[in-house]
Image (cartoon, rainbow, N blue to C red):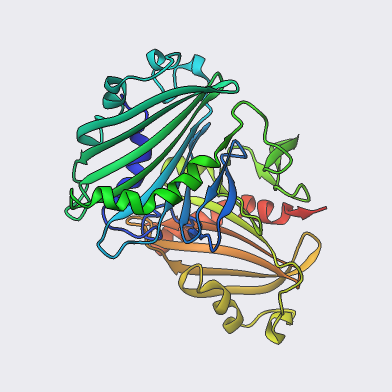
Amino acid sequence: MQFLRAAFACLALVTAGLTPLQAQQAPGTPVPHLAKTDESIQIARGRVTLTQPAGWQSISAGEAAPGLWISLFFAPRLSDGAVAQCTVLVDARPWTKGSNVVPPDMRKKAQWSSEDWKRHYQSPFESVAILQTKGWPVSSMRVQQVLMTGSARKWSDSAPQYVKIEERSYLSADGVVQVSCAARSSDPAAVAAVYRRSQSDFAKVFDNVQVKLGAPASSASAAVVKEREGHTLHMFPDGAHGIWIPTGWRVSETPSQPSMMSLRLLAPSNEKGEPVNCVINLSDAAGRLVLKAEERAPVWNEATWRAWLNAYSDAPELLERSGANVANQRAQRAVYKFNGTHAIYKNNMAQTRIHLSPAHVWMLTCIASGQSAEQAAALYNRSLPAIDGILGSFHAD
């Protein structure tokens, strides 16, 4: 039974001792979001709403396949090396196509048995002990719950081996949402204590889950609203900002926060092993942003650009600087090279456009990544018509 394998594959990097930032493998993946207070967030195009506990970081692995989303949530690292984390897997692929992560024999059961759950977890764990199972109806869905402990196979020499997990699976005719929260430690005697320490945060996640499988994304979530030849218009959660996406590009979203809207687009070349992606971040400053004198200049100098780019890229080498327009507003444009942390595609060439005002920050970036600087530059130049089209199509109503 493999319907959690994708989620645990994503978690393997973190359980190996990596930080959430190090765990990001795709070039241009957004920086993890740190919740300073308990925050209500939406994932999977508004299909799931839940609470991210204060102090936790979140990473969206985006749309792993059409109709399949994975998001990861991490508690602050514990002093003894233990880990507390939650995973949300959303599978909205049609049951009839046989591609959904829940096997056919599991879909209509009133309550999954201990043996069902053991088969569920047999891939990532060597041994599993089921402590409790439940099943109950909620509206048009069926919820399956388990509390279990297990001994995990080593993903690396430093990976915690012992785990206590609570999972709830929400099943409907339109798909499944799996919410799993886990305490992990290399000390089997410490797992229960780690779980108890984290239980109040786990409860915040479980108690505030809202699932809307089968329903179109609401006005409070990103939604595609119309098409034109060769492009699709993607609207952001506020309904006032949009961007035209070329045919063949696909959306891989990040969680929408109350003060930020973020969208990641993947080019068709990603499927061929030549990563090209665009990240659009829209931040609401609510009139509080104070612009420095150098940020008001018609064309930013290198120092001003570096002050912005250093937070997103390592030692950028600026190639071009100019003024630009973003949504009919005066903006800044830069083309630059930087080295990334990806194991293979370490060389990157990017274009960023920024518009600042006291009310908001719009930052639009497209990145081409290669195994060499020459490969990255060639891929960037081949992709430039699409990149310019995407960045130039951003609009604000």
- Quarter holding the N terminus is top left
| Residue 274 visible in the picture | no
Q: Nearer the viewer, residue 314 or 338?
A: 314
Report the residue at 60% width, 50% height from top: 40
Count the marks: how many? 0
The answer to whether 34 appears left or right of 235 in the picture is left
The answer to whether 167 appears left or right of 350 in the picture is left
Report the residue at 73% width, 82% height from top: 297
| Residue 194 visible in the picture | yes
Q: Nearer the viewer, residue 385 or 73?
A: 73
The image shows residue 184, relative to residue 115, as above or below, that is: below
Q: Quadrant of residue 108?
A: top left
The answer to whether 3 appears left or right of 364 in the picture is left
Q: Nearer the viewer, residue 147 or 342?
A: 147
Residue 311 % position (x, y): 51, 71
Residue 178 % position (x, y): 45, 33
Residue 347 % position (x, y): 41, 62
The image shows residue 89, relative to residue 356, as above or below, that is: above
Q: Quadrant of residue 338?
A: bottom left
Residue 7 % position (x, y): 38, 39
Q: Nearer the viewer, residue 128 or 196?
A: 196
The answer to whether 335 appears left or right of 127 in the picture is right
